[in-house]
Image: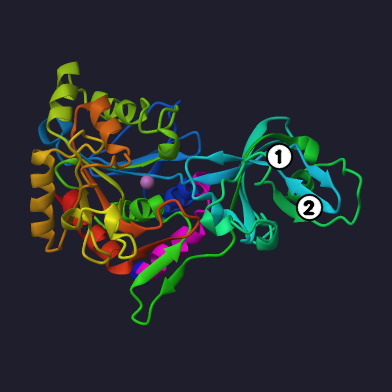
Amino acid sequence: MNLTQNLSDFIKSAPTAYHAVGAIAAKLKSEGATELDEKARWTLEPGKSYYVSRSGSSLIAFRMGRKNPAESGFMIQGAHTDSPALKARLEKLLSGKGMDRAPVEIYGGPILSTWLDRPLALAGRVIMKNQRGQAENRLVHTKMPIGVIPNLAIHLNRDINKGFEYNAQTHLPVLLSASGKTEAATVSGLQKLLSEQFQIAPDAILGSDLYFVDAQGPAILGPAPELINSYRLDDLLGCHAILEAFCSTDAAEHTQVACFLDNEEIGSRTAQGADSSFLRDILSRISALQDESPEDFYRALAASFSISVDVAQAYHSSYPEKFDEDYAPILNGGPAVKVNGNLKYATDGDAEAQFHLLCDTAGIPFQKFMSRADMVPGTTIGPLTSSITGIKTVDIGAPLLSMHSIRETAGILDHEYMVRVLKRAFAG
Ligand code: CO
């Protein structure tokens, strides 16, 4: 199967971070990797692959090196599984005057207007009481559109094209049905829907993390075609590139580590995010199981290198004033190394040089992203994982348009370049 089709299928299976981790785990398992539980005792063998997930939305995979980490270090690659979204408030239904609406709250920083007037599906996880009375996680994805957030007609807001501030409490509830009744319904529309579509009794639902997501899958665009347009390219592009690179590389001297971390969009400071103990816990555990001395763990960290793979602002010809043209990556020009004087990205001169060498060896072009000197760029997981582990890190990303829109646009060729350089890095 070609890489673009493979990417498209991966995206279809990953409408939320929970689904992304499910799809990544399934692929790793099919490639022979062994699942580990953080609560169990581990035994690790050289050359073998393993993966461990935390909270159902973050996952770290690793393949043991032929040499101990103290000798050859860890080669780490990381991306994030979450994207800006609208999270459903399950229990409540706003009902009356012919409209049944499900209230939401905003997760991360979406371009809100892009969520309106689009068919939305519901996806995420439900924690339900099973027949033995225990809590059990279940992934749900309606796939079919189940709602829409209708805009106000332009006749009632003539200035809407001058910009409109949407209020999360009042403007964003999702229209689920037209009841034709003026009085309020009693059962939440979403609970009813879950019980009908997934045979989950409303009183069996103990907890949930559900999101309204784009119901339309990825589109491959252009006459060539050279572009991909989809939900969650930030950062499923990074997740998929790392997964492909990891699965298509053999064991090397160093231990290869692939991180897929949740909660980047809200600052990563959670039990399973980049600003948590997760990565360091796994690295330290791998080291401890080699009968290494405590000192050897520090030697392993010092011998390691990390690549943080997110997306980068692609040059947008309609808004030239927003870019420093000499540091604005173009679509299909190759992955961008992301640099900032105040280290919003982890990249320093040394890390940039390492990446430069990697691209040369992989035979791919690369670009450099820096924001205008009078603007502050975003940030990503690189500065967090590097400060927690002390590992030299480069921040890179595929050029992307419309970052944080419900549908973003990227170049197909950039994804191929990205997979090639990441494979090169894992191979060593
Ligand atoms: Co991102």
Residue contact at pointers 2 and 1, CB within 8 angstroms: no
Task: Measure the alpha-carbon separation of dots 2 and 1.
Answer: 15 Å
Can residue 262 be seen at all in this image of the molecule?
A: no
Q: Verify whether residue 8 appears in magenta.
A: yes
Q: Position of residue 59 (x, y in %)?
A: 41, 40
Q: Is residue 289 magenta?
A: no
Residue 296 visible to the viewer: yes
Q: Secondary structure at mark 1?
A: loop
Residue tagged by mark 2?
A: 196
Q: Sort mark 2 into few (<14), some (14-19) or many (20+) by Cα contacts within 10 Å.
A: few
Q: Which mark is residue 90?
A: 1
What's drawn in magenta, residue-wise?
A: 4-19
Residue at 91% across, 45% down = 183
What residue is shown at x 17% (from left), y 33% (from top)? 69
Q: Is residue 209 above or below residue 223?
A: above
Secondary element under disc 2, as helix, strand or loop, is: helix
**Left or right: 219 as drawn, with respect to 422:** right
Residue 114, numbered circle: none
> Looking at the image, is mark 2 or mark 1 nearer the viewer?
1
